[in-house]
Image (cartoon, rainbow, N blue to C red):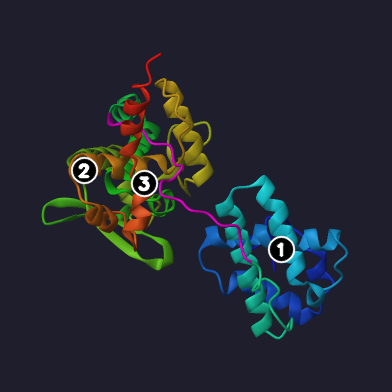
Amino acid sequence: MNTAIVLPTQQLPSLIESAEKTAKLRFLEFFTVNIRNPNTRRAYGKAAAEFLAWCTGHGVTSLATIQPVHVASWIEEITRDCSVPTAKQRLAAIRHLFDWLVTGHVVPNNPAHAVRGPSQSMTKGKTPVLSPEEARRLIDGIDVSLPIGLRDRALIGLMVYSFARIGAALSMLVEDVFVQNRRMWVRLHEKGGKRHEMPCHHNLETWLGEYVDQTCINLNSKGPLFPTIRRGTQRLSEHQLSQPNAWAMVQRRAKAVGIATMLNNHSFRATGITTYLVNGGTLENAAMMANHASTRTTQLYDRRNDNLTLDEIERISI
């Protein structure tokens, strides 16, 4: 089995390599059988590789000898270098991994169960947000005379007007853009295998329509809606655009129109939600449109108070 499928390196951690065959198989099955989401698989694989390498470096000789103090010490160390959400995610990965190993009779108990992760209280997310004027300037600044421009405008527009996650947007097939009741709709494949359908805003309908028609991408309904560009040409390929490439595109487009905000792939989702709420939309409807299970998650994207804070700061007149 190719370990690169489940781990960020080609080689298994030494604690796994030196374990019995059943333990090695159970470890690999955790990623291939138990985890279906490729992003979760990649993140959990990175956490497992780092933790087991840390254990080896601190004198641990087998999986069965890993103790809660090892997990707690590792979490303490990584919390100094990474964000609290990252540390909590890595602790969750180790907990789930050892739960799987316990049920497979590889280890007697889960050393991560007793370990508490770092605490965090968030009322507002950290995702950078654009003003409506900046978002429009960014979209209007895209040269749509070439397929790459049509693609980029459609992708950014989709994330703004449908509150789509970048993963859901890039996973779309051409057939996920369809007409229903004389309106264009989009079908998003969200986390956990959930299917989320939304009607298109008239701007998004125009941009998607021009993209599909002018690039003839609809000739392959099972192909990716947002593919890469063939190297050395301006033609679309058959390969799905990756999240890092989408991030690079966003950075390039923002720089071209003089936007200094350090955008990321989620900035357009946050921009769309905030603009919707500023214009009188309700938090409940925003949560439904964003496919959030709770309005508490949606509130992390609500940046309406940023303008209020800036206005109050300007009252400090010296």
- Residue identified by numbered label 2: 205
Label 1, label 3: how many angstroms apart (C-alpha)? 32 Å
Q: What range of the chain is rendered magenta?
A: 116-132
Q: On the picture, is 184 further left or further right than 76? A: left
Residue 193 position within the rendered picture, expressed as x and y whole percent measured from the top left: 40, 67
The picture quadrant where one finds residue 312 is top left
Residue 108, placed above or below residue 82? below
> The N terminus appears in which quarter of the rendering?
bottom right
- Residue identified by numbered label 3: 301
Q: What SS does tag 1 mark?
A: helix
Q: What SS does tag 3 mark?
A: loop
Local crowd size for mark 2, using a 10 Å CA cut-off: few (<14), some (14–19), many (≥20): many
Tell me the amino acid under the disc marked 2.
Glu
Local crowd size for mark 1, using a 10 Å CA cut-off: few (<14), some (14–19), many (≥20): some
Residue 182 position within the rendered picture, expressed as x and y whole percent measured from the top left: 11, 52
Q: Is residue 118 magenta?
A: yes
Residue 103, placed above or below residue 121? below
- Residue identified by numbered label 1: 72
The residue sitting at the top extreme is 318
* Mark 3 and mark 2 residues within 8 Å of each other at the beta carbon: no
Residue in the image at 76% along x and 63% along y: 52
* Mark 2 and mark 1 residues within 8 Å of each other at the beta carbon: no
Local crowd size for mark 3, using a 10 Å CA cut-off: few (<14), some (14–19), many (≥20): many
Tell me the amino acid under the disc marked 3.
Tyr
Residue nearer the viewer, 192 or 282:
282
Tell me, yes or no, if residue 275 can be seen here.
Answer: yes
Q: On the picture, is 88 further left or further right than 26? A: left
Q: What SS does tag 2 mark?
A: helix
Residue nearer the viewer, 275 or 29:
275
